[in-house]
Image: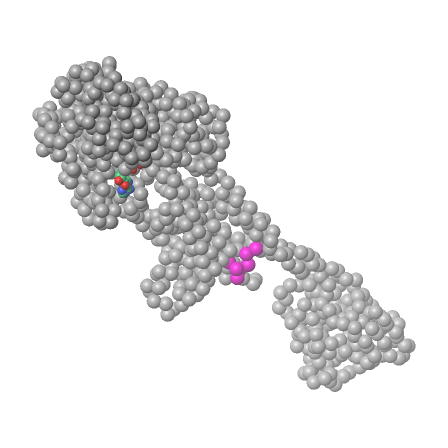
Amino acid sequence: MEPIENENINKDPVEMDQVLSHTNSIETLTSSTTTTTTTTSTSTMSPSSLINNDYLEKINVKFSETLDYDYPTKDSNEGDKYKDDQPSYDDDNAKNHGYSFIKQFKALIKKNIAYQALVPVLMISIMSIVQLATPSIKYQDNSNPISLPLPFIFPPLINYSVPYIYDSTDVKVDLGSCCQNNSGFLELFTTKNQISPTPYYSSLGSIPTEAFTFYNYPNQHDMDEVSYKQGRTDNKFLLGYDFRELQITPGGDLSANLVSYSNDTTCSSSLINIMNNALFQSFTGSNNILLTGVKTFPYTAYQERRDMIQPQENFWYLFMMSFCMVLFVANVVYEKEHRLRESMKMAGLRMRIYWLVQYLFNFTLYMVIVFVAIAFAYILKFRFFTQTSFTIYFVLFILFGLTQIAFAFFISVFFSSVYTATVVSFIYIIFTALSSNLLNNAFIMNPNTSLVTFVLTGLIPHVAFHRAVSYISLAYIGNAPGLTWTDIFAHHQMPSLFGMLFAEFLLYGLLHQYLEMVIPSAYGVKYHPLFFFQPSFWRSKMSGNLITSNGIPTATNGGDDSTLNVDMVPPDVLDEIRYTYSRENTASIRLMNLYKKFKVGKKTTVAVDNLTISVEKGQCFGILGPNGAGKTTTLAILSGLYSPTSGNALIAGHDIVKSLSRAQQSLGVCPQDDVLWSEMSGREHLLFFGRMKNLEGKMLDDIVDKSLAEVMLTEAQDKPVREYSGGMKRRLSLAISLIGSPTAILLDEPTTGVDPFSRRIVWDVISSYKSKCAIILTTHNMEEAEILCDRVCIIDKGLMKCIGRSGDLKTRYGAGHTLSITTTGPSTIHEFLTQIIPDVKLIHEISTTRTYAVPRHAIKMSYLFKSIQENKSKYFISDWGICQSGLEDVLLQAAEH
Ligand SMILES: Nc1ncnc2c1ncn2[C@@H]1O[C@H](COP(=O)(O)OP(=O)(O)OP(=O)(O)O)[C@@H](O)[C@H]1O
């Protein structure tokens, strides 16, 4: 289209704009109108039903034409037919835009693996470090005795209750019976033939008398059995002697210096002394014995690493299994804080798949930790694991894992900062690990605990888990054999703890889902806390409609508090409205009376005020406006981050109120801030979002390669995004928005903060994609708007002020020329200018520099030049210049009205 001629200004502006704005679309439409009326819609609504009828009447749209119009849709049962019939949406990749559970599921899993594969490794490392730091302990190895030579051992096996000898012919002690075949200690005496007959003693000290009983030990093994047998219950002593010196005087005394050994008994050393004396006196009649020491028999000892977790310190198990909870919380909050969840939503991800994958992934991660912990504990012979039936603790760990994940998601709802969420989760875990014992004893085990306290304490999953761990530990403490299922069913505590953990899993899972729906956050559609009591909720469920935060069905509220006054609507805007609602319109993007208000406290802000716009395929449409004009909010509504307070929009024929997910599948979004995972590389981002758009295999790889090349990120493709510069991130965000050949692309200030080099790349890429899709672009860069946009609109306070090609707007709304004058001091230049140009308008004044809008044809340029030149010194003009006004002036003018 050629630029508009001056004389056109005098024509009917509506008619003129209609011609200017929609030539392309009308060309495309003529072929489609004959067929679209036969297509049956299942998910989109008639455009006229999206706003109130009064309004349409006012703007002179014929209902008879629009009300019965069956808007074409890809959701139609006759999808293929639709595709043939709709040249406006004949995107080759349209079939890829269908929603696929499996593909989204796989894409999320792959993203999570790329992002979090190191977590189990971290867990193993921590466990290993703790175990290495645990000091080893010296263990007595009774199973491997040090065999002493038989002569060394004097083997009287003495009953526990026999430390006394008394003189009685009835109770004679047959000392010789222990040493048959001339072996043993007695032989020492007999072979030397120096021993007198066994004497009889009436008493030894004041200890009651019993008889010694002697046994013969035919071999080393039997004696070792007695010497070292662990956990002996027969209360028998074995005494042995190590002679250091021995002097035997024939027929006389025995003089000896010896060490006495005893086996491991509960007998005191003084008692053993008495027995030793009694024995030697009974053998020799001599008192001349020097007993150097009493020792236990020597045993083999070895250093063994202790269980890093002792039964009394079982909070370690709680800590070990809870550590991952911090990651579960942090991961979810991270994606919330950095708006990654919203970004995935905009790419068409369904939240139920998101949460399902989060549950499964975190559970898998947890189970990896569990298996690693079990393997590790088995290798190190932790009795918790070796002495308890495997299935008992395995079931417990599974239940705790499920509950813990649900609990982590539940608490994540209350945080919007990863930092806070991580710190609070850590404190929670440390607190519960250290205080669970106390809590359990004080409340759960205490019969005086009130039911409310009991339930509240038990509702903390970690306390319930610790209770179960304590039961298991108690069952193997000391030499106890460990817990079995039989024990479990014999006592009600463990089954009730299992039940409690499972109930908590359900409870926190449901609470989490509920709170996600109702707790307000910066983005997304939120429900009324009592939404399930509202008939509108169930109606919308049946019809697939959404509810706004104030409970009003979005498609039926006609923007009652709209500030739009139809009579005041500029003609070009009115024309756009008429065209958008016309039955011929099959534009890829159609905004229909889109209205959004925010209520913060008592203050209500209307961010988008009845925007009605059509953007055709092959067109780049610019939304310009000052800060806070409502540009980002408009794109946020289109991408599904906010629900409109009223009005609606169609993206590739999909209604954003009823079929948001399908609309999102046809949409590519480059948000104002770069929403990226800092640890993932550029390539991984593109692969992930490509999978979201149902691309896979070689096709996906090729498309990703191409995208990376387009935005000049091929070299940096494998670097984590945290190492990208601002410009690189912006280019990556652009590439993400373009992947999967979306039908509609929303670019929110794509070149903000980038250098001229990156800006050129972005512009080139946008230009090359323009022919394949419909693009809406917001920008503050007027040069960008002029270069890229086929049409622009200017909005202010949510309201559309003007719309058209930038050239037209400059002609119609532009000031004609912009005159800048700088004076050296106070001057009456303003008065002078208003005198020579009555319509001149001061745009802004900064210090001594004033900028004026000089209306077209208001003055002859030659006369203006001459007048200023001649009066330079009179008005202290130090500098001046004049240029043709650009879009910026249009923007400034429009925003003022
Ligand atoms: N979540 C919100 N809650 C309350 N008010 C909001 C919210 N988001 C935006 N607004 C308000 O809506 C209006 C439009 O904001 P928006 O961000 O859409 O403007 P914008 O044109 O994109 O501005 P900029 O050019 O600075 O990006 C502003 O007045 C803003 O304060």
For the residue pair 840 and 889, the one nearer the viewer reads as: 840
Residue ID at (28%, 28%): 874
Which residues make up the magenta segment?
A: 308-314
Q: Position of residue 860 (x, y in %)?
A: 22, 18
State which quarter of the image contains the N terminus: top left
Q: Is residue 357 above or below residue 396?
A: above
Q: Is residue 386 above or below residue 447?
A: above
Q: Position of residue 852 (x, y in %)?
A: 25, 28
Camera sees residue 288: yes
- Locate ligand 1 by image quadrant: top left
From the top left corner, tell me how far across and down residue 156 is, in percent: 74, 71
Q: Residue at x 36, y 57 (%)?
A: 459
Q: What residue lies at 25% left-to-right and 32% top-to-bottom?
A: 828
With respect to residue 755, does 318 lie above or below? below
Q: Can residue 698 be seen in this snapshot?
A: no
| Whole-percent x, y for residue 776 in the image | 29, 27
On screen, residue 704 versus residue 810, left or right, reads right
Lateral position of residue 786 relative to residue 6, left or right? right
Quarter assignment of residue 231: bottom right
Based on the picture, tell me whether residue 858 belongs to the magenta stretch: no
Figure label count: 0
Residue 76 lies left or right of residue 357; in this view the side is left
Q: Nearer the viewer, residue 449 or 553?
A: 553
Residue 409, relative to residue 834: is it above or below? below
Q: Nearer the viewer, residue 412 or 607?
A: 607
